[in-house]
Image (cartoon, rainbow, N blue to C red):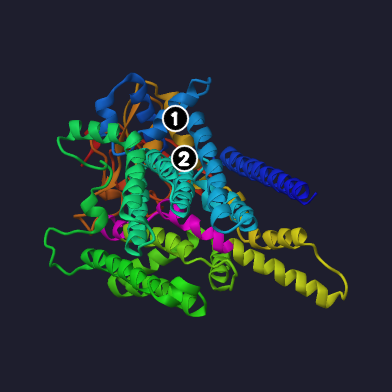
Amino acid sequence: MLPDRAAELSGRSGSTDRRAVVALFVLAVAIRALTAFRIEVIFADGPSFIELASQIGTGNWEAVLGHPYHPLYPALLLLVRALGTDLETAGTVCSIAGGSLAVLGLHAFLRDAFGARVAWIGAALLAIGAYPVRFASDVQSDGVYLGFFLWSVAWLWRALERQSSRAALWAGMLAGLAYLTRPEGVGLVVVGGFLAAARLGGRRWTLGQGARWLASLVAGFAVFSMPYLFALSRVNGSWMLSGKKTLKGLLGVLDDPFAVDSSSGALIGGLALLGIFAIVLRRPSVTAAFGWSGRLAWGAAFLGVLALDAAILWLPDAREYASVVVSTLGPGIAVWAAVGLLVKRADRSPDRALFIAAFLALYGLVLAALLMNYGYLSRRHALPPLALLFGYAAIGTNVLADVLRSGVRRLWGGSRLSVGVSVGLALVIVASSELPKTLRRHRDDAIAERFAAEWLRDEIAKGGTVAATKARTAYYAGASWEWFPLRYETGDPGGSEVDRLRYGDAEILIIDHEVDSGRGHRTGRPEFVELHRVELDDQRALVYRIDRARRR
């Protein structure tokens, strides 16, 4: 009787889990599709992905391999276009699918690492998060990359916990697909190697077990990555991971290794951070019990991240770094993740802490190097590793649910909230800080410029070169117009903003309100002959013909 009852309960649990997974996927697809429907202007790099897909379609592999973007996402656009849609719509569909599957990938990791309740709460938070939704609702590779990244993380955790070479093979293959989407995907194999080395160093694995596991991980990665790496080497004449960013630049390495500046400091700080984690996580208080002393040590390591940033990076960069990290998570989710990190749990796990910390440490180093060497840091780069903190945000949300249940008991005597209702209310409270931003329309400030470009497409069909700040302006102007990147000449600080515009050999110039900002300099360029203007609320975009004969 008891075995039958156990089987019945197990079946019900499995059925409930499947329904939760389906509900999460439907929620993720619905909110991303709604966001995509409300986007009026394509992502800035969207036309580049569409052009790359066209090059793949025509078999122009030299152009494909010479392009800084990796080819998997554009190739997926071609596959979806075969269903009868255009490339722009295909790109959006791929992004929605990838971002929604990322939610399931996070659920799979959290279920194995934290448990079922944390899994569906954390995945629900990812499903509705503002930036996870935005990055998976447009023609951009980030949604697809996040999907491969999180599924690789899920299989990597399973491979480590079960000492499974087969799971390591799956993790490697998914990492290879992530790498074919974005170059950062190679970091999954690096983290996997670091964690395997930690288990070998701790004598939890024999040398033979570690060798088989690592061989499976690397072999899985090579299945999809090696053809691309080999093709890159043939085109460029040397082995390289990506044409987008140099490995030297990503790591902050200088020609003079003894030069002490912010770039080398980023590298030194990142290596110091890895050392801190190695020292802290080897302490008996952490590895044995992971009690209060362990949690304080783990928290101190992350405070060390901020201290290193403040000491090594210039103050403005440290502020930008911190603001990107917090805003990517969302302030509400960041707060509840902090709560989840501090709360005492019976299932605390040093392996889980080390696993997540390794991802944050490695990718945190890459993010710091991007900021210092290339002058920018995008939330798109920060989201994949930070998504692993949604498990702690789910723990914090569960703490809030416990508080709600105890509060109801105290205020209304015998009244009780069920676990499901209290967790649902807690989710609503946490989500209330995210949903307004998630559902808000964005990129509307570029609508006037799109309308100006479409006027050019409809009224002047002969084509030529159009100068504009973004490639998507030429995209909306039509295939007959080639884009020239509009820029400023920085060597003349005394000149006006518009006087310093450089537009090459373009015949047409399209500028928006931000550039032509009412400073009175527009009439100072006699070669600019206004053809059309678009005014929408506080937006303005202008189309000029460039008459070089009138140039002073």
Q: Is residue 477 visible?
A: no
Please, is residue 69 above or below residue 498 in the view? above
**Element at badge 1?**
helix
Q: Are the residues flagged by discs 1 and 2 in contact, CB closer than 8 Å?
A: yes
* Disc marking residue 181: none
Give the SS element for disc 2: helix
Query: Could you tell me residue 518's position as x and y percent?
Result: 41, 53
Q: Position of residue 32 (x, y in %)?
A: 58, 42
Residue at point 54% right, 73% down? 342
Q: Position of residue 364 (x, y in %)?
A: 36, 61
Q: Mark on residue 76?
A: 1
Looking at the image, which residue is at 81% across and 65% down? 417
Three-letter code for the amino acid on which mark 1 is drawn = Leu
Distance of label 1 from label 2 (alpha carbons): 10 Å
Does residue 18 appear in the picture of this structure? yes
Q: Which residues are magenta?
A: 369-393
